Structure formats: C-alpha cells, structure tokens
Image (spheres, grey):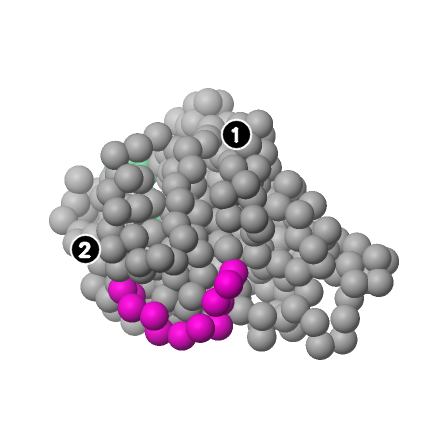
Amino acid sequence: MNAISTTPLDQPTVMAGEKLAGKVALVTGGSRGIGAAICRSLASQGASVAAGYSGNTDRAEQFLKEFECDFPGQGASVHQGNVSNPEDCRRVVQEVLERHGRIDILVNNAGITMDKMAMKMSVEEWNTVLAVNLSGSFYMAQPVLEHMVERGTGRIIFVSSVIGETGNIGQANYAASKAGMLGLTKTLAKEAAFILARAGKLVDDGIGITVNTVTPGFVATEMLEAVPEKVLDKIRSQIPVGRLCRPEEIARVVHFLAADASAYITGQVWGVNGGLDM
Ligand code: CAA
C-alpha cells in the first residue's frame, strides 16, 4: 500500500443550490469514494439519493448516518446489490422506485480494478472486471431507461476513466471496460433521443433524456492504494496540474450534467483528469 491521502478535502455538507430539488438520484457504488462524493454533491443541489453498494453493509450504514446528519430530511437510502448480476440490478431499481417513487438520475459509478500485465492476466480477472464495470452499467441502465422513457425525462451518467481513452500498463481489463462505456453512452444517448422523438415526447425546450460519461483521471480514493509507490510517483509526474484529483472535482461535473438545464448535452465524454490526456 502507498501513502496517498484519501481524506476528502471539500465535502459539501450544506445546500449549495436547488437545481436538483425534487429529483431522485440512484448512484451505484455510492457509499464511498467518488460515489459518495457524487451523492453529497447531488444532495447539495436538492436531490434525494439512493446509494447502491455491493458488500460492505457497515460502511453503507455509516454513509447513510453521516448523510442524514448533513442533509436532514432529504430522503436517502442504501441498497445492496451486485451490479454484475442482472437480477440484482432489476431488484435494486425496483426497490428505489418503491422507496422514492421515481428515478430522475442514474449514475453508473460502481467499478473495480484487478491490475496485472496482460500476459499474466487470468480469464477470470478479465471477465470479472468487464462484468462489474461494463456489463453492470448496462444492467443498471436498461431498467432505468425503461422507466425514464415512460416518463419522458431522465439523466444517465457513466463514470468511466481516462484509462478508457489512453490505456494503461497493467489495466487491459479495466481499460477495455471503461472504453466500452464510451460506446455504450453514445448508443444509449442516440436510442433515448430516437425513442422519445418517435413517441412524440421530444419537446423543443424540454428536459429530455440525456446520457453522458465523465472520465476521471487518477482520483485520491482507496482504489489508488493498491498502486505501488514507484508507479504512483511516475503517474503523478505525468499529470500536468501536478496532483491527484479530488472526488469532489468529479462530483461537480456529475451534478452539472444532471441538471435540467443540461438538456442539450448528450452522448458526450467529459474529461476531468488534470490534463493527463493532452
Ligand atoms: N505507468 C508507468 N509505468 C508503470 C506502470 C504505469 N501505469 N505500471 C507499471 N509500470 C512500470 C513499473 O514502474 C516498473 O518499472 P521498472 O521496472 O522500471 O521499475 C515496471 O512497469 C514493472 O512494474 P512492477 O514491478 O510493479 O511489475 P509487477 O508485475 O509486479 O506489477 C502491475 C505490474 C500490476 C501493472 C503494477 O505495476 C501496478 O499495479 N501498476 C499500477 C497500475 C495502475 O496504474 N492502476 C491504476 C489504478 S487506479 C484506477 O484504475 C482508477 C482510474 O480510473 C485511473
């Protein structure tokens, strides 16, 4: 383990605006890291939040307790489910609909790494990472999109990675999964607009359904703790702004894309990487 600090610096704990007032957001992997920052950022704009988590119930309950303390009365819930299991995804979506009545925003954030040089990577390491990061995003998006099409409005935001655009030593599975999310984003964006238009629900100044991706660079979360110190030093030296990203710097782009006023942005890839891909 290396010595990076994963202490959040700037967690919003107050209402900063109201542009998501009355909205319900479902964030996978929402109880920690980038996902928790996204939940807080959406809540700071007035959204109710349902956070998905896979295994760590204590952590999820702790997240919920802190969240309810910082955003009292704002309607928060946590939901256990493995995103690589399509039945779990459908169940979680159903739970959120029963609890909150609607889903306006889906953030597909849950993701894992199993880093290994490609020649040493097992079939299982390949499949597991693809199943969680890429298939999991699809399994969540499918039932949520059905619901959004019915209502005629919605926002889907994928949390991919700069690695999906640049590749990275030791990350064949992760890079492929994150690159796959870019194609998935653009396809769902086209299909959502097409289906709304065909149903006569594409209103000129309407909210519509948009699908976008954020591609974070190297963010100071637990995921980075597995990277050997000498490799992390190399990575840091390649980032033009000279430091790791803070989770909140990803989260603010997500809440911007989630707003009704972002209706004209769809099928796009938003890099937040300190200039790493230049
Ligand atoms: N960039 C540049 N050089 C790298 C590198 C990288 N990403 N990864 C490894 N190297 C270099 C090492 O510095 C080392 O170089 P030297 O021989 O000159 O010292 C060489 O490759 C071999 O590395 P290891 O000795 O570590 O070899 P290993 O077989 O024990 O492990 C590895 C290989 C599993 C790839 C390991 O190096 C590793 O974990 N690398 C980090 C991979 C990484 O960047 N993961 C990002 C996780 S965070 C994330 O994924 C979120 C996101 O979206 C950005």
**Residue 178: x percent and y percent?**
51, 47
- Give the quarter of the image for residue 273: bottom left
**Residue 224: x percent and y percent?**
27, 47
Instruction: Find out whether residue 22 is within the magenta segment.
Output: yes
Q: Is residue 156 left or right of residue 255?
A: right
Q: Residue at x 52, y 29 (%)?
A: 88
Q: CA distance from mark 1 to mark 2?
A: 31 Å
Label 1: which secondary element:
helix
Q: Residue at x 19, y 48 (%)?
A: 230
- Give the quarter of the image for residue 37: bottom left
Q: Amino acid at mark 1?
A: Asp
Q: Quadrant of the C terminus?
A: bottom left
Mark 1 vs ligand 1: CB below 8 Å: no
Split into quadrants, the picture shows ligand 1 in the one at top left
Q: Is residue 225 above or below residue 157?
A: above
**In this orientation, which residue lies closer to the viewer: 184 or 165?**
184
Provide the residue designation for mark 1.
88
**In this orientation, which residue lies closer to the viewer: 273 or 201?**
201
The residue positioned farthest toward the front in the image shown = 73
Q: Which residues are magenta?
A: 12-23
- Give the quarter of the image for residue 52: top left
User: Residue 176, can we see it?
Assistant: no
Provide the residue designation for mark 2.
7
Secondary structure predominantly adopted by residues drawn in magenta: loop
How packed mark 1 is, by other alpha carbons closer than 10 Å (few <14, some 14-19, many 20 or more), is some
**Residue 251: x percent and y percent?**
39, 62
Q: Amino acid at mark 2?
A: Thr
